Each structure stands twice: as C-alpha cells, then as structure tokens.
Amino acid sequence: MEFLAPTTWADALAAKAACPGALPVTGGTDVLVEINFDRRRPPALLDLTRVAELRDWAPDRGRIRLGAAVTYSRVIDELATALPGLAMAARTIGSPQIRNRGTVGGNLGAASPAGDSHPPLLAADAVVEVASAARGVREVPVAQFYTGVKTNALAPDELIAAVLVAPPRGPQQFCKIGTRNAMVIAVSAFGFALHPDRRAVGTGIGSAAPTPRRAEAAAEFLAGELDAAGLWESRGELPDGLAREFGHRVRAAAAPIDDVRGSAAYRLHSLSVMARRAATWAWNDYRRAA
Amino acid sequence: MTSAVPNSAGASETTASRGRVGDSPLRPDGLLKVTGAFAYASDLSRDDMLWGATLRSPHPHARIVAIDTAPALAVPGVHAVLTAADVPGENAVGLEHLDQPALAEGVVRYQGEAVALVAAEHPETARRAAARIVVEYEELPAVTDPRRALEPGAALVHPARRDAGGNLVREVRMRRGDPAPTAPVVVALDFEVGMQDQAFLGPESGLAVPGADGGVDLHVATQWLHVDQRQVCHVLGLPPGKVRLHLAGVGGAFGGREDLSMHAHACLLALRTGRPVKMSYSREESFFGHVHRHPAWLRYEFGAERDGTLVYARADILFDGGAYASSTGAVVGNGGSLGLGPYRIPNVHVDARGVYTNNPPCGAMRGFGCVQAAFAHEALMDELADAVGVDPVEIRARNGMREGDTNITGQVIDSAAPVAELIRIVRDMPLPPGSPPEPDLRELPGGVGNTTHGEGVVRGIGYAVTYKNVGFSEGYDDYSTARVRLEVSAGEPVATVHTAAAEVGQGLITVEQQIARTELGVERVVVQQADTTVGSAGSTSASRQTYVTGGAVKAACEAVRDTVLARAAGMLQRAAADLRLDGDKIVDVSGEVLTGVADVLGDEAVEETLEWRHRPTAPLDEETGAGDAHVQFAFSAHRAVVDVDVELGLVKVVALDTAQDVGRAVNPDAVLGQIQGGSAQGMGLALMEEVVVTDGRVRNPSFTDYLIPTILDTPPMRIEVLEYADPHAPYGVRGVGEPPTISSGPAVAAAIRAATGKALRRVPVRPEHITGA
C-alpha cells in the first residue's frame, strides 16, 4: 500500500487526481479500523494531517468554515456556541482519545448512516465544500452529500475541504441513543434546529435509514403549525400534542433495519421520543431567549 | 472490618510498609500497568521468531471435504502450513473430556473452529497466507437451539456419542425432602440469560521456542500452566519434561484462559519450523479463541408459607455448552447444587443439564454456573416477596442460610453464613441523593447522548444475595504446590517463593509475599516466575488461589521456619518452640534477640517444597445430588439503585453497594479491587454484555458491538467487608473474586424491574425490553 503525504492542499488535490483510489486519512479512527479488519485494501493512503489549512476554522462570509481536519475535541472546546448542534454531537463520539483524533471531515468521508456529525449538519443546513485539482471548488448541500450506505457525492478526484455552516439563529439540539452511557455507536440519533429568521425547522435522522436524512415533512409540519399559531412571534408555549405529533412524523421519515445494535421498532420508537423531547427543549430555549 | 466508601483512599497506607497478612502493600505490577510498561504476553518477542496465524471455520457445522494448502505455502515468507494431518500426537484436547481436536479433522462443529495454521516471517504474511488455504466444506445441519438439542431426532454434534448421551454433556439431579410438596403460596417464572464474554483486555498470546532436546518452551498467558501442559503434551506426543510452560504477562482471564487457545498451535509450528513462533490474536479472533459464559434457560418455582418461608423449590436449568464440553460438566454441577441460592429449602427438585450444540463453545467464567441461576432465583424471590407482602430484604433475611444449616445437597454449612446480616447491611447503607433539578447529563440515563433532561426518569432499587463455592468441588483432588527457600544474601535474609500459580491480575504475587513475610519474619521476598519446573498450583479460578496456593505457601514457609528454628535451637540450646524469626534476627518469645538468621544459616539455604490440599470434597449422588460437594461457601449481597428512562429504556446505575464476607482480608485493597471489578462485570451482564449468536454465527465479535461498562456506566460503590474467619481455611480466608459477579447483576435487574414495573425475564435487559418497542 502506497502512503501519500502531501504538505499542501494543492499537492493533496494533485495526489488525489493522480491516484483516485487513494483513501484519505486524518485521524484514522475509522480508516485504520477498516484496514486492520481487512475490510478495505486501498491502493494508497492519502495522509492529510500535514495539510495545515485543513486544521483551521474561521468565519467566512457569514458562515463558519470548518476545515475538514478539525477534530471533535476542538469543535467541543472552540465551537460550542457557533455550532451548538455539532458540538453536542461531538461530545457523544467515542472516548476522549477518539475525539482528539477524529474529524468532521472524516465522518463525512465515511458517510456512515451512524455518523454522529450528520444529523446536526442536516438540521443546520450545512454545505460541504469539496475540491479537485481539475475543477476547483464546489459546494454540495449536505442533504445531497449522502448518496447511499457509506457512499457520498465526491467524485474520484475530489477531497473534502471544509464544512460551511451558518451561525445558529435559534436553539439547536442533538440526541443519540446508545446502549451504554458513553463510547457507543448510535442506535438512533436526531438533530434539531429552530431557524426563527426564516420560520423554519431543521431536522436530521441518524442510524435509522440507509443514509443520514432529514424528516422534511415533519419539519414543514412543525414550522407551519408554529407559524399558523403565531408562535414564532409570541414565543408562547407549544400547544398540547404538537411536539408529540412532530415526533410521530419524524418517525414516519425513518426507514431503519433490525441489527445487532437495536431493532427497527425500537429505532422508530426512540426517534419519535427524541424528536418530541428535542423540539420541546429547543422551543423552551427559544422562549427563554426572548 | 474493612469498608470502602466512594472517594476514600489510602486507608491502608499506615500498615502497608510491613506488607504482612492483613496489610495492603503496593503490588509490584501496579505502577507498570498504569504507565503502560508492563510486558504482557502480546509483548513477547525474539529476534528470530516467526508469526503464526490460524484459519478458522466460517460455518457452524460442516464436513471438510478437502484442504489445499499449496496456495498458502507458495506465499513468500511462509515457512509452514499445518492441518490436522500434521498433529504428531493425539488430536484431542479438553478440560473434562478430550472431545476437541487441536485442529479440525474431517468436520467443523462451530464457527471459528481452528482448521489450519500458518507460520510466516510477518504476521500479515501469515494472515494473508491463511486466507489462501482452500478448504472445501459441505455444510451440515446445525444444532443451534439448545432447547431442541435433546429432542429425539436432533442432529448429533458428536455422532460418536450416539449411545453415550447424544447431545447431553451432563445432567445433575437434586432430590431432597417431599417429592410432591404443596404450599399455600406458589410463584414461578421462566428466565433466560444471554451469552457473556470474559472480555479480558489482553488477547490470547504466546511464544513457543523449540529446544535443542526436541522439546519446546511455551511462554503463554494462561490460568493453569499444568493443565495446559498436559493437553499440549498430548497433542505433541511429548512427555512433560519436553514441554515446559512459563507464565507470560496475563491481561485478565475470568475463566476465558482455562482452555487452550494458541498453546498447542504455536508449539506445533515451532517444532515444525525449528524457529520460535509467536501467536497473538486480534480482538475479533479472541472472540472465537476462547469459551464464553453459558447462556441459560431457567424455569423456577417456589412454594412458601403465607409468611414467605420457603417450603419447596423446583428448578429446571439448561446450559448451552456449544460444540465442545470444556468445563460444562462442572458448570452443570454448580448450577444444580448451588442454583437455588443461599436459602433454607426443605424440599427440592432440581434438574440441571448442559448440552452440545453447534454454537460457540462455552465454559468457565467468573461465577461459574451460579451467575445464571442467581438471576432466576433472585427474580423469583422478589416475586415471592410481592406475593406474600414482605419486602425484598426481609424475605431474604427470613429464608437466608445460617451457619449450621444444610444446603440442598445435604452439606452442613460449617462456617459463617451471614445472609441476613449482609442483606440488612446493604439495605442500611445511605441511599444516593435524588437527581438535582438540572443534573449533569453524565448523571442521567443516556449520558451525554442527551436523550433526557429528567423526562421519563424513574428510580428503582433492587436487592440480591448469593453464595458460591470456593475451590474445585465434587471430589476433585484440588491442591497446590509451593517451594520456599530461605537464605542470607548480603547479610539479609531473603525468602524465595516459587509456585506455578498464575497471576492473572488479581494480585497473587503480593499475597504470596505477604504470607512469606508473615511466616518467616523477613522483609525481602522474591516471587519467581510461575512455570512448570515446580508442581501444579491448580487453576487460578474458582476464587481459590489465595486459599489453596496461599495455603501451600504458608505450609512451605512453616516447614522452612521449623527447620531453621530447629537448627537455631540446637545452636542455642533452647527449645525450638520458644524461638521466633523476626527480620534478620532470631528472638525468644519476649522479643529478646538471641542470634542472627545469618549466624544460623551461614551460606546454606533452607528449602522446602510442599503439596497442600484443602479438606476433601465428595461427588454428588447420581440420583439425589446429595453429597458434601464443596469446600467452602462465600456469601455476598448487593443493593442496586438505578435511574431508568422508562420511555426510552435507557438505564443509569446510580449506586451499586455491596457487603461480602471474605473470612479474612489478606490484602484489603486487593479485596476491594476484586469486589469492584466483579460488581461491574455482573452489572455488565444485566445491562449490555452479550455475544449475540444467530444460527450458530457470532454477530458482534468486537468491542464496537460487544459492550462492556465504561466509567460513565459504573457507579460509585459502597463496600462493606465482613471478616468471619473460616476455621477450616488458612488464616480464615474465604474466596473473594466471584460472589460480587453473581449478586450484582440480579440486583441491577431487580432495580430496573422496580423502576419500570416490567417483568424483564431476560438479561441483558435491552432498551426494547423496557419500552416494548
């Protein structure tokens, strides 16, 4: 196996173009496990840890531009206010050692339906910035990034440069079910965001469909009900049963399987509970923020 | 009395310096382990060594039609590829029955069974070459439901046993008192216990070094060097003098290292290649490389008076032994003879069976047959409490064994049996505070998963008691050998202790040092590496080493002391009985210094080697199960406090408090460590630990999906240690390691039942069992 170790972003893109089968690696928390278990034998590893610009985040034209190699630990420590949903998700990932190595870019690259970054990125309408030596930069809305089980929208010569997320205009929540209280892969997960500036609701479902996905109809339903009752302005209490109905509609958006981590029925049930609770917490935060 | 409360530390420091029995000296491996410097078996290395790899069966049951090793041999760097045809001795191993081939011969009986071996220059080369071996299989019908294994017409896992029990490994019957008892209150249940794994952190590893004499030296992480030696000799066709075993650094055992794993394989490869061969399993391979705890199906019925006093108990217990017997027979013996718990029951009817299936082989694990039973008898005891309107503590106190009682095999409990005291101690411990209004997420069910801020959370409290046999039972000749030498080095007396007892992480080396210091009065005690140049110490299992090897070391020290003092008495013209060893001096009873140890010993060493046995046990009667089958009984009680998110089925154990009688705490810190670890392991089975097997195939052979409790799952533990000395045991000790693993899980399950109102008749309790979704 070849080991490519570019030190600049341009070199990294050139290497990827020259060897499209090269598997990018930063923290190695996923890639090295796959290799150790002999599940993947890529012709080359493309080590991106020497590319300094991938490790930075900064405000960028009204959005946070999060370099692909920023670790979960830094998201937790530095971005809890700017990217609250993502920071909440980062807190649930692995152990401190894993969070010190693992990156949001890596989570997107793996595109596992169980990846913890995905629900908050979906809920926050994040955009994935990808690049290639031949065609330069393009932006892919995160909802279009996941194309199948562990596949994504990257072309063979493309790399993930960054994730672009608008700062929150309202409260965000992230909930994740695991069968122990730490260091666990999600049985099911849910990301939620209120976007009062555009009277919208953001959602993201994890581990309950072939890809991470939104609960679009549920989000539109909730946003519409809030609008109809004038609640975005009044910040009044949630009407009886509204969060519960939202939970049911989130559940309807999922398509989980039975596996060794949990049953499909439990995944559906837990999603409906998480969605109800997350919406309630976020709404209460919104009311308190008035 | 020793006790620990959360956050207490250093209580033993004042006594640690002397390092005698009852102190808690620092253990020699402690600092090395916490700094990562300890050399485990997986760290073994030789410059000229090869690496071994194992090809395993993908099928739970299949005929091997053909094996083509040529593609593997063609891989550059490969030195040998071996199959059953290359086994020079008899291709049969096993703890109780030699029913398992070292390498599969003609048939594979479980997924993961070893079929072929490769030795190569690099571990990855060995693995890749193993993958190139072409094995043609013809799949056979697999027996995967143990409840159907004994049905007429069931496929036979071992066809040769057609007229010798078929798929039945062992059946134990307990019959006592009235064969048809009746009682005014009757409660019954069915319970199911999933397959737990020992989940030791150090995977199976060892290094086999061929010797100039045609023999082999095997350095290996194990629990019992001599039982390994016997089996490896059998496979190699070599006498014991040519198969020398040395204990390598053991990273936990819990029963999972009683059977052979890579032992014979590495030796086969080393003898074939003439090179040292190292084998070290990956985590995934480890799940296929050792036995697991038997899953069990249990049907229990209690009959009682209206006040809750037990009149009778019936139990039907089925253990899935998997493809090979391992220690299933002894597990059945324990399940049958101890499986009704530490209660006074006049009328008893128990059937316990272990069966062969094509599931993964199951064998020894901490708690050994009592763990499964305790979930059933403790759940049923709570049912009985409910039925008669008595609280769970009082029902146990009322029915609990007392010293002088006879248990269900008719054996008199002839030392402390403080069931009522233990359960009342845990009841009376302070309860943890309730959740604050805005609790830290880590204090809530679901943890940082942020699934509740208090919604749906209900607290529950549960209790359980247990008793467990210590040492090997049913007439087994259970002994240990110790060699102790006393000599003077640089003017200072030094004791050297040599046994074959495996230190697996429990702290036995420290215990051996403490005993030698106590008996010989010396400060410096060297414990030699365990190996087979000294006689067997028996297994590091059954909570027995402090008792049995401790007893052997004590006896050998006494023999050395007697020799030294007799010599001194001759020199001093005093009676030996008036003399004592004290550091580098020999003193009289008043402490007056009479002479130096150096003056008595000069350049000579005094050495004694002794075999030491605990009092004998007897077999269980075939028809009634009667018999004084056990050496000693150890009792413990647990109280669990849990918060359950009843809507999501997630559990946070808030407190797991325990009381246990240890007879005498030889090393109080080590006792607490055993109790903490055992409690966590039992809790793990209640909450999450299960090897999930579907149609004979393991679905979660990794720590990604075989979950064990993390620190955020493990609560503070209040521990109260009673020391009611057992007059039959050295220093009065009572085995410590297993009881906490037995009573903690049922207490956690009971607490979840209390919080949810659900019956929960299966462990691990999964979220969907609580939510019903």
Image: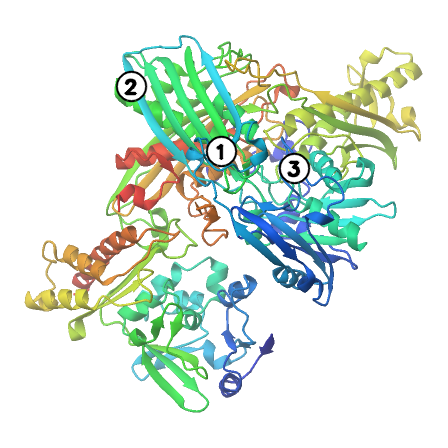
Residue B529, given in percent of the width and then of the height, sits at 75, 40
| Residue B246 can be seen, yes or no | yes
CA–CA distance in space, label 3 to label 2: 44 Å
What's the residue at 31%, 84% (across, down)? A61
In the rendered image, the vertical position of residue B675 relative to residue B570, given as above or below: below
For the residue pair B484 and B289, the one nearer the viewer reads as B289
In the rendered image, the vertical position of residue A37 relative to residue B287, given as above or below: below
Q: Residues within 10 Å of mark 1 (few under 14, many from 20)?
A: many
Question: Could you tell me how many numbered marks the image carries?
Answer: 3
| Residue B1 can be seen, yes or no | no
Residue under label 3: B223
Dot 3 or dot 2, earlier in sequence: 3
Mark 1, mark 3: which one is toward the viewer?
3
Residue B168's tag is none
Amino acid type at mark 3:
Gln
In the rendered image, the vertical position of residue B570 relative to residue B666, given as above or below: above
User: Residue B552, located in which quarter of the rendered image?
Assistant: top right
CA–CA distance in space, label 2 to label 1: 26 Å
Q: Residue furthest left?
A: A229
Residue B659, given in percent of the width and then of the height, sits at 47, 27
Dot 2 or dot 1, earlier in sequence: 2
CA–CA distance in space, label 1 to label 3: 18 Å
Mark 1 vs 3: CB contact within 8 A: no
Residue B741's tag is 1
Q: Chain of mark 2?
A: B
In the rendered image, the vertical position of residue A217 relative to residue A185, given as above or below: below
Asked if badge 1 and badge 3 are on a common chain, one would say: yes
Mark 2 vs 1: CB contact within 8 A: no
Residue under label 2: B390
